[in-house]
Image (cartoon, grey):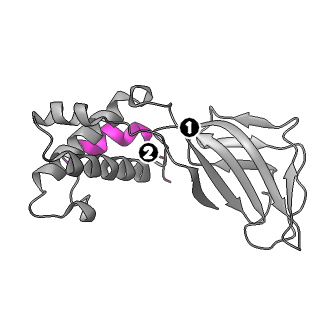
Amino acid sequence: MTYATVAPPAAEPLTLAEVKAHLRLDGTVEDDLLSALIVAARTHCEAMTGLSLITRTLRLYRDDWPGTGVIQIANGPVQTIENVTVYDVDGIARSVSLSGHMLDSASDPARLLLADTPAPGRTLNGIEIDFVAGFGETGADVPDALRRAMLMHVALMYELRGAIAADMQPAAVPVGYDRLIAPYRPARL
């Protein structure tokens, strides 16, 4: 299973103003750096938790249908299923009807059950599932613990800005970061 972004988030979970207030900074001299650090903090948080913080459209690629018929979608929280496409042996796309589908977005990971599951003809990535995931459209929709973790992370990256270039971030994770994101990390056995 592979995930790809179809439509990126329209905003970041932290605003530049929030970060500047947290760091007690005035002026606009380092706004570009701070904006880059916000993106780095969000990207790192999403990688650690497997979540989409701000609403975006993603695509799940599958080679075949699972034997149980239940498709697990790990990159959540899943809001809606937009469409499902299956490719035949000639590479021609066919939309799968979403009539009668069931989405269990309360599960972690989310689960999708389709009434119609035609066999893909393409061996690799023969199935594409487009879905919308995220807590909401703005940072206000993101759980406070995740936002606090990202604020701490931006502060540490800002502190290390002279030693580590912005494109090499995140260079470190602050103490307490793991405890803040722990409830949102996937359980590992």
Taking the image as shown, residue 20 lies to the left or right of residue 57, namely left
x and y, in percent, of residue 158 in the image? 15, 50
Q: Is 182 contained in the magenta span?
A: yes
Disc 2 crowd, CA 10 A, few/some/many (<14, 14-19, 20+): some
x and y, in percent, of residue 51 in the image? 49, 44
Identify residue for label 1: 77
Rounded to the nearest whole Å, what is the CA distance between mark 2 and mark 1?
12 Å
Query: Is there CB contact under 8 Å for labels 2 and 1?
Result: no
Q: Secondary structure at mark 1?
A: loop
**One can see residue 67 in this view:** no
Residue 58 badge: none
x and y, in percent, of residue 55 in the image? 53, 37
Q: Is residue 43 above or below residue 98?
A: below
Taking the image as shown, residue 75 lies to the left or right of residue 60, namely left
User: What's the magenta region?
Assistant: 174-189
**One can see residue 65 in this view:** yes
- In terms of image quadrants, where is residue 28? top left
Q: Is 186 contained in the magenta span?
A: yes
Query: At 43% from the left edge and 30% from the top edge, which residue is drawn?
Result: 138
Residue 185 badge: 2
Residue furthest toward the top? 140
Q: Secondary structure at mark 2?
A: loop
Query: At 44% from the left edge and 47% from the top edge, which residue is drawn?
Result: 49
Q: Amino acid at mark 1?
A: Pro
x and y, in percent, of residue 167 in the image? 27, 63
Q: Earlier in the sequence, mark 2 or mark 1?
A: 1
